């Protein structure tokens, strides 16, 4: 399996695990949205928490030029280490939600 398809499958597997975790409060569902053609992976929260509408992107991951870019990470402990544990090297993961000047302080790729 080539690297691109390996990364796609790994990201989908990790995000699907999160999508299957039920919320302990409110009537909130998680939706996994995948655009394989453009390599976008989103985990969305949709529903109600008491009288408040919940609708937003929990996590957004892209594959850009062969690297996995985490554009938004709303996972409590972060999604990056889950991706590493699933087999994607830290050197291939960019924490896109950090400013470029900060990324070199992380253990992950700069760009």
Image (spheres, rainbow, N blue to C red):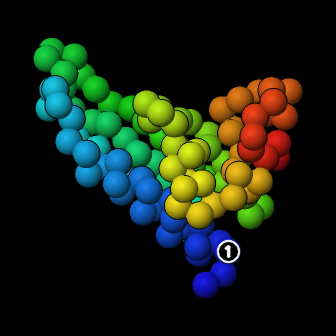
Q: For this view, does 89 lie left or right of residue 7?
A: right
Give residue 53's position: percent from left, percent from top.
24, 22
Q: Residue at x 69, y 38 (%)?
A: 96
- Reading the image, the residue beneath label 1 is 3
Q: For this view, does 53 lie left or right of residue 98?
A: left
| Residue found at the far front of this picture | 85
Q: Nearer the viewer, residue 4 or 107?
A: 107
Give residue 35's position: percent from left, percent from top.
50, 61
In the image, residue 104 sits, relative to residue 64, either above or below, namely above
Residue 88 occupies which quadrant of the picture?
Answer: bottom right
Q: Is disc 1 surrounded by few (<14), some (14 to 19) or many (20+) residues within 10 Å? A: few
Q: For this view, does 45 lie left or right of residue 33?
A: left
Q: Residue at x 58, y 45 (%)?
A: 80
Residue 70 seen in this snapshot: yes
Residue 85 occupies which quadrant of the picture?
Answer: bottom right
Residue 34 seen in this snapshot: no
Q: For this view, does 92 lie left or right of residue 101?
A: left
Residue 75 occupies which quadrant of the picture?
Answer: top left
Q: Considering the image in quadrants, where does the N terminus appear? A: bottom right
Q: Nearer the viewer, residue 88 or 33?
A: 88
In the image, residue 24 sits, relative to residue 5, either above or below, namely above
Q: Residue at x 74, y 64 (%)?
A: 66
Give residue 46's position: percent from left, percent from top.
27, 36
Secondary structure of the residue carrying numbered label 1? helix
Q: Nearer the viewer, residue 64 or 16?
A: 16
């Amino acid at each position: 399996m080539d690297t691109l398809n390996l990364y796609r499958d790994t990201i989908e597997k990790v995000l699907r695990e999160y999508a299957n975790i039920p919320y302990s409060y409110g009537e909130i569902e998680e939706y996994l949205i995948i655009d394989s053609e453009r390599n976008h992976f989103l985990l969305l929260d949709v529903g109600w928490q008491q009288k408040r509408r919940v609708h937003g992107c929990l996590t957004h991951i892209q594959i850009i030029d062969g690297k996995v870019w985490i554009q938004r990470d709303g996972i409590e402990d972060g999604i990056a280490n889950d991706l590493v544990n699933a087999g994607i090297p830290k050197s291939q993961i960019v924490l896109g939600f950090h400013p470029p000047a900060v990324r070199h302080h992380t253990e992950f790729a700069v760009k």
